[in-house]
Image (cartoon, helix red, strand yellow):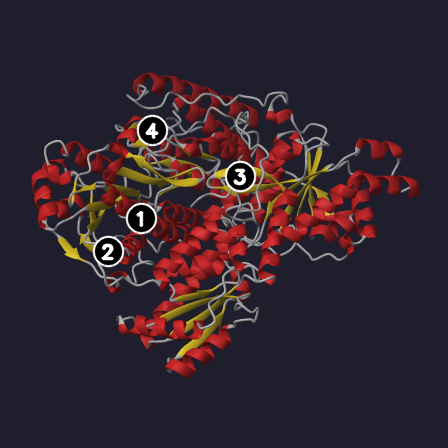
Amino acid sequence: MVAVPVPELSPEASRLLVSALLALAAGLLLLSFLPPAPKGGPPPAKKMAQSRSGHGHAENMGIGKAIAVLTSGGDAQGMNAAVRAVVRVGIYTGAKVYFVHEGYQGLVDGGDNIKEATWESVSMMLQLGGTVIGSARCQDFRTRDGRLKAARNLVKRGITNLCVIGGDGSLTGADTFRAEWSSLLDELVKGGGITAEEAKKSSYLNIVGLVGSIDNDFCGTDMTIGTDSALHRIMEIVDAITTTAQSHQRTFVLEVMGRHCGYLALITALACGADWVFIPESPPEDDWEDHLCRRLTETRLGGSRLNIIIVAEGAIDKHGKAITADDIKTLVVKRLGYDTRVTILGHVQRGGTPSAFDRILGSRMGVEAVMALLEATPETPACVISLSGNQAVRLPLMECVQVTKDVTTAMNEGRFEDALKLRGRSFQNNWNVYKLLAHIRPPSTKSGYTLAVLNVGAPAAGMNAAVRSTVRIGLIHGHRMLAVHDGFEGLAEGKIEEISWDRVGSWIGLGGSKLGTKRTLPKKYFEEISINISNFGIHGLIIIGGFEGFTGSLELIEGRAKFEELCIPLCVIPATVSNNVPGSDFSIGADTALNTITTTCDRIKQSAAGTKRRVFIIETMGGFCGYLATMAGLAGGADAAYIYEEHFNIHDLQVNVEHLTEKMKTMVKRGLVLRYVPVLGWRGAETDARVTPMSPSPFPWCRNERCNENYTTDFIYNLYSEEGKGIFDCRKNVLGHMQQGGTPTPFDRNFGTKMGAKAVAWITGKIKECTRHGRIFANTKDSACLLGMRKRSLVFQPLIDLKEETDFEHRIPKEQWWLKLRPILKILAKYNIELDTSEKAHLEHITRKGIALESNI
């Protein structure tokens, strides 16, 4: 391709010449090697043009309306992602969007605290912790006079939609403001603060809340913005402390935040395998001191060189007396004489860069908040955007606030069982799994059953946590537990050994696979596998792995017809960084890989901070599955993610290059410095570049490893390099196997732990069900299942049924939930597309006998 001497031509002549050359090249390339549609693959992506019935196109919903966004109360990582999404989607819909600086105080004070936001004003804030627009505790807003001032400031700017990001106190204040709105306007009109015409134009106020709180103390949502990032900070510290504790055989008592909620303490204890955890919702029994000392002693006698105790700052005993970290230290030193240290984490838990999950959560909630505001009517109650499983739901704000307050009331009245129930099923499940692993020991009476656990496929962070949980829960059930090394190949070669409780004690925080894992499938080893199943007396198999684990298990089912030994229950737990196993929305290991990519992208963007006009192409893993590309694009603020699931051609690449060059030139003409425009590329992902960027955007572009056999990363790199000469530089990065390594994130540790526990419980019941006259014979389709997360629940699904949902040629499910998030990525990157809002989050309700909408995970 001929380099265009742009500097020697006028800007207009350069533009025309570049366009002509690109069009010619596109035609020639398209004829020469445009790939045919993949067999069995998805059809070319259709333009998303569905509109919301009765509302017209989403990009017109906000015309003539104004939205204000504020952050209030304690800061939380991910708030900036939510603010960014509210601003950009609000502008996309045609609405005016305003920042309210310093929370409710800024709303009361007005003036420069309330400023109109622009698209560029939220650039470079996605990866920042805290809240860029500020937050403050405000006593003035608690008074009627303060709310009068706030109402006047909104009315004068024509703002009738308010998005509040904060905790239950902040959201309660917003609901009070809304309830008083009419009377506030009447009072302002009488006092001359606003005119009757202004009051008429602002006759009602719409309120939508987003919960930003690291404590995860708001009922009705699985996760609040900031919680996952806080867990990342905590686990980084716990992992660091573990090494020094082992060196000196010390006991460490760590205090984490959670004055009225023990979520952080509980998940930390699950994720690090703590010996004991104290949470306010479930105080220990009166003789807890004896139990604690006995537990610590047992751990040391089992060979452990350390003890970890986690304490929520609001921990109490059954009589309401505080249990502090210093109290526990004094007890351990006095009774056991152990070298004991106390670490109070404090505000470090609030700081730092938001995790990938919190960036995506904040972005998704921000988008839904704008839609909820613009759809609201005077009769619509104030709502809060919540997360249930992987689904965004709208809940009545005050119902959630009331249940949240009910938890505190229950604890104050000593009704701790009610407090646990009010926290929801997810919290209860976490607590029950922790109690099983920490407080129960294997019984002396054995069940007589033997379970084997193995890893299959590529290694994924969190596999070891799943194995640890499987082994220990199996031993608690009285089973004999066997570890199979090197996957199906090891099962065939007899690489099988009995594994003990203490053997897996330290595995929870280790990356990779301690058992060893291979991609070998079992079909050619049926005879050897059958012999070893018989010789070792295996009654059930738990297979933790990726797509090979899924397909290998299907082969075992086929082998049942010839080999009776294969007629035993088996359960597959998805574990792969690619997140491409059918039957589950998430796989163990994908969250760790996603955070690795996101962190790397942050560093790459930072490296370009001192370089003008640079494009980065980054290639990630994923095979034919574009999950990592898409989600990392959302978390990293990418301009595009090229994935297999959305077909693209040379014309689309032409459009992308044209608009990228135009962006660069436009930015220079404006006198602005574009430091970087990273182009992120993932292995296995394709681009849908048919949409047109509306204006310059300093964000990445993405491509994955198998998106197209012709449009490779090198091809895209060369194309951008050639067409960008004189306009921008181009760099490429292939992340490779670093995405499979590293310490598992809190999510992957917790997810693996719960999946292992649930799988053992299921397979135990299935073995009993399939036992006749002392002999196990499992040959029904429901005796071989995959345990997966489907929307709001963990469910067991027959592997045979999942065959119809699978594209075996490309190793992906035929339907993938995250594809619905791709329009959000494009709109946030300022692409001119129509948002598909045909599926919206309807207003739902919660109950007080437990949070009905919380996911059963």
| Side (left or right) of 364 relative to 62 | left
Q: Nearer the viewer, mark 1 or mark 4?
A: 1
The amino acid at mark 2 is: Lys
Quick one: label 2 or label 3, which is nearer the N terminus? 3
Camera-side residue of 138 and 540: 540
For label 3, the SS is helix
C-alpha distance separating marks 4 and 2: 37 Å
C-alpha distance separating marks 3 and 1: 34 Å
The amino acid at mark 1 is: Ala
According to the picture, the residue beneath numbered tag 4 turns out to be 711
The amino acid at mark 4 is: Tyr
For label 1, the SS is helix
Quadrant containing the N terminus is top left
According to the picture, the residue beneath numbered tag 1 turns out to be 761
* Residue at image location 47% in from the left, 46% down from the top: 357
For label 4, the SS is loop
According to the picture, the residue beneath numbered tag 2 turns out to be 514
For label 2, the SS is loop
Quick one: label 2 or label 1, which is nearer the N terminus? 2
Quick one: label 1 or label 4, which is nearer the N terminus? 4
Q: Nearer the viewer, mark 4 or mark 3?
A: 3
Q: Is there CB contact under 8 Å for labels 2 and 1? A: no
Quick one: label 4 or label 3, which is nearer the N terminus? 3
Q: Nearer the viewer, mark 2 or mark 1?
A: 1
Camera-side residue of 673 and 515: 515
Camera-side residue of 647 and 659: 647
According to the picture, the residue beneath numbered tag 3 turns out to be 364
Quick one: label 3 or label 1, which is nearer the N terminus? 3
